[in-house]
Image (cartoon, rainbow, N blue to C red):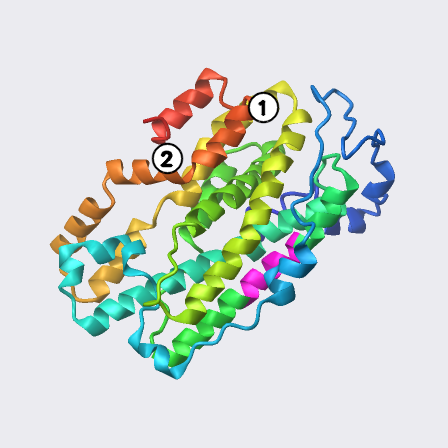
């Protein structure tokens, strides 16, 4: 992904950055690919236990991808009477203190939640996911992948760029229509936490950690999007944008689940042990809410510090956070469990410490 470390201090992921390969004048990675000619399998020196076939989830991409077929989603003047996000999916909106806020303020809270979702999507797609997807497409991530798998990465690159575009577009439309100014940090909480994780690793370990984070995020995000309802009380442009996103991410989920098998087959023992220890932390970085930012937002609505503290403690108790994390990460954990990533006791300890074993 050219790294989230790289976006702060230059590029740290030089092992698979296509720009770095070009500027160093290295040979086209395609020239070094060695396949055995079987149906999508790859032959890896050092030995995958078995050939890993690739069945493309993008066979109908030209007919179904949002970037190919979805119209621009437009916010209408009459949408002001509708919610800009489903209150049932904004945890703090259920708390009695928040329900007591004036109707206009409550509506602003829902709009700010939409802004957070769109900001999260924008930063995730273009700063993190698409940098890795470019490396997969160019063949410069250090993995031997079937040619069709690399070609599908170009389709994902288009998808993720479009997700960024429609997220920025929708945010601009909502701000213009409502006059509500976004209260957003420069970088989402997950990026700050990911940077902390990467800073603690040796430089040689960071590219693997970044690739793992993309696998984790792309298999987790479809579960998060599945929670969003088809509610007539939501602004249609919001509902349809999220539906477009979810449809594309279903294909991405399938792709990265298969990529994990290819990756695992080509890792050495020490790298596999690192995977097991890192994945629980990476899932937590993706899923954990930014309580500091949420507290500041609630305070901006006139809630006193005691009310803010009580609201956050009751809405985001450790039991609630851990239960949500376990439910949302179920499929992701299953994929890593299937390849053996959590067989090491240290990996099990990490799962337990982050609340993934209940």
Task: Determine which quarter of the picture holds residue 208.
Answer: top right
Above or below, 253 relative to 60: above
Task: Determine which quarter of the picture holds residue 126.
Answer: bottom right
Query: In the rendered structure, which segment of residues is drawn in magenta?
Result: 156-165
Above or below, 92 relative to 211: below
Mark 2 and 1 residues: CB-CB less than 8 Å, in contact? no
Q: Nearer the viewer, residue 258 or 97?
A: 258
Q: Is residue 40 visible?
A: yes
Query: For numbered disc 1, what is the local secondary structure?
Result: helix
Disc number for residue 301: none
Q: Residues within 10 Å of mark 1 (few under 14, many from 20)?
A: many
Q: Residue at x 76, y 44 (%)?
A: 148
Q: Residue at x 72, y 35 (%)?
A: 143
Check residue 159 for magenta coloring.
Answer: yes
Check residue 137 for magenta coloring.
Answer: no
Disc number for residue 326: 2
Residue 247: x percent and y percent?
54, 55
Residue 70: x percent and y percent?
58, 67
Q: Is residue 6 visible?
A: no
Q: Residue at x 85, y 36 (%)?
A: 32
Q: Residues within 10 Å of mark 2 (few under 14, many from 20)?
A: some
Main SS category, magenta section? helix
Quarter that holds the C terminus: top left
Q: Which residue is mark 1?
A: 272
Query: For numbered disc 2, what is the local secondary structure?
Result: helix
158 vs 28, left or right, is: left
109 vs 241, left or right, is: left
Of the numbered discs 2 and 1, the one sitting upstream in the chain is 1
């Amino acid at each position: 992904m050219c790294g989230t470390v790289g976006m702060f201090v230059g590029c740290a992921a030089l092992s698979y950055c296509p720009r770095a390969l070009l500027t160093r004048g290295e040979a086209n990675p395609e020239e070094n690919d060695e396949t055995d000619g079987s149906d999508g399998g790859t032959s890896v020196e050092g030995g995958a236990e078995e050939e890993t076939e690739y069945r493309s989830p993008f066979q109908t991409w030209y007919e179904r991808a949002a970037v190919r077929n979805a119209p621009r989603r437009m916010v209408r003047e009459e949408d002001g009477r509708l919610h800009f996000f489903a209150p049932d999916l904004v945890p703090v909106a259920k708390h009695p203190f928040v329900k007591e806020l004036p109707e206009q303020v409550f509506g602003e809270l829902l709009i700010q939640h939409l802004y957070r979702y769109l900001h999260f999507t924008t930063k995730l797609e273009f700063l993190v996911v698409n940098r890795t997807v470019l490396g997969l497409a160019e063949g410069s991530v250090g993995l031997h992948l079937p040619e069709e798998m690399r070609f599908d990465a170009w389709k994902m690159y288009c998808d993720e760029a479009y997700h960024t575009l429609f997220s920025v577009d929708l945010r601009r439309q909502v701000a213009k229509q409502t006059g509500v100014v976004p209260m957003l940090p420069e970088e989402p909480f997950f990026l700050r936490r990911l940077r902390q994780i990467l800073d603690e690793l040796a430089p040689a370990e960071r590219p693997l950690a970044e690739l793992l984070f993309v696998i984790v995020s792309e298999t987790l995000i479809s579960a998060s999007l599945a929670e969003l309802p088809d509610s007539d009380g939501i602004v249609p442009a919001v509902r349809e944008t999220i539906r477009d996103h979810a449809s594309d991410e279903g294909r991405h989920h399938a792709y990265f689940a298969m990529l994990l098998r290819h990756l695992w087959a080509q890792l050495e023992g020490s790298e596999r042990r690192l995977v097991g220890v890192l994945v629980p932390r990476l899932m937590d970085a993706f899923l954990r809410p930014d309580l500091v930012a949420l507290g500041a937002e609630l305070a901006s609505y006139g809630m006193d510090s005691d009310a803010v503290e009580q609201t956050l403690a009751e809405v985001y108790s450790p039991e609630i956070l851990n239960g949500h994390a376990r439910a949302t990460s179920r499929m992701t954990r299953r994929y890593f469990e299937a390849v053996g990533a959590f067989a090491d006791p240290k990996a099990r300890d990490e799962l337990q410490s982050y609340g993934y074993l209940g």
